[in-house]
Amino acid sequence: MPRAHNPALPRLNEDWLRTMSVEEQQKVKRAKELARGPLGEKLGKFPLLFAQSVLFGQCPSRTRPVEVRSGTITFVDLGAGPFGITCQHVIACYRKMRESMEEVVFQIGGVEIDPLSQLVDENPKIDLATIGLTTELARAIGSDGEIGSCVFRPRTWPPPVLKVGDYVAFGGFPASLKRVISFDELVFGSLSNGASQISSVSDFQFVSKFDREYWVVAFGGERHLTSKAFGGMSGGPAFIHRELYWDLVGIVSEYSEAYDVVRFASTRALRADGTIEPPPG
């Protein structure tokens, strides 16, 4: 089960602050204090309430090396019952492993399932896949702690169209924070970002470009994210705060090391029953 937290929030450039008036500097200083305090912690932790780690690969063995991959799943109920959302490339990787290896398992948190028999829909172009969950299974998968303890129920669906300049909070379970306890026990650390600015938007995805120099840590460890930190976060939720409520606007899809950006699959293609509206063409 996840034990570690290592979120990051945007930090403001100290040189830029010097060009501001005293009043503006005070406002920025206060904003940074809020980001480092309870507000920043709440923003960073919120996505993780609805996310759980995904583990898939060969059964553990003392006698032979095994291949294990990881990802993230998001729990939602859009009005027609609970289901899980992850990336289609996660399901495709599991499917390929099952075709070429023996004793391949798929586990959400501490619960083993067959994602293919419970697959509701998948779309490789958008990079979304949905897995049907009964209320009982969702409860069994859910954590007793904060992380992965809730099913997200939106105020309305689908969410409004995003704009460049909006800020999203997202989270997941990067492989770089995974710890091997024994041959058959792994611990997945969680990571979240409470305010990542959207730099571009298209019909079925949006992108957030990082400026790591300006990040501040709101809670958890002091490590900054590295280029390898995002493997395993595929399937994690991205929310936008609307003052009185949150909208689930995306799912972590891909990290580009060349451009230092995270791409998100838009959730607007999801229907209430978990089916996915295919893109035109």
Image (spheres, grey):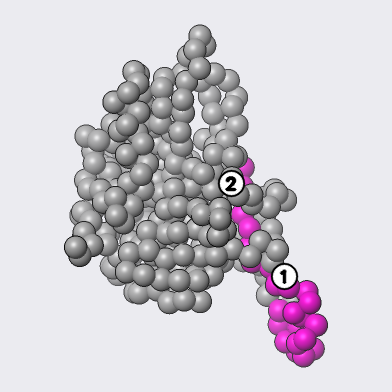
Res 33 label:
1
Q: What residue type is labelled 2?
A: Ala
How busy is the neighbourhood of tag 2: few (under 14 within 10 Å), some, or many (20 plus)?
some
Q: What element carries label 2?
A: loop
Q: What element carries label 1?
A: helix
Res 151 label:
none
Dot placed on the residue nearer the N-terminal end, 2 or 1: 1
The residue drawn where x is 28% and y is 68% is: 158
Across and down, in percent, residue 236 comes to: 44, 51
- Specify whether residue 231 is painted magenta: no
- Could you tell me if residue 271 is visible in this image? no
How busy is the neighbourhood of tag 1: few (under 14 within 10 Å), some, or many (20 plus)?
some
The residue drawn where x is 36% and y is 36% is: 93
| Contact flag, marks 2 and 1 (Cβ < 8 Å) | no
- Specify whether residue 13 is painted magenta: yes
Q: Quadrant of residue 189?
A: top right
Residue at the extreme front of the image, as rendered: 258
The residue drawn where x is 32% and y is 39% is: 92
Give the spatial CA distance, label 2 vs label 1.
26 Å
Across and down, in percent, residue 105 comes to: 36, 26
Please tell me whether mark 2 or mark 1 is closer to you in this view.
2
Q: Quadrant for the C terminus, please.
A: bottom left
Across and down, in percent, residue 230 comes to: 54, 48
Q: Quadrant of residue 160?
A: bottom left
Of 64 and 4, nearer the camera is 64
Q: Taking 271 as reference, is 5 above or below it?
A: above
Q: Identify residue for label 2.
A: 229
Q: Taking 205 as reference, is 141 above or below it?
A: above
Residue at the extreme top of the image, as rendered: 63
Of 252 and 170, nearer the camera is 252
What's drawn in magenta, residue-wise? 4-28
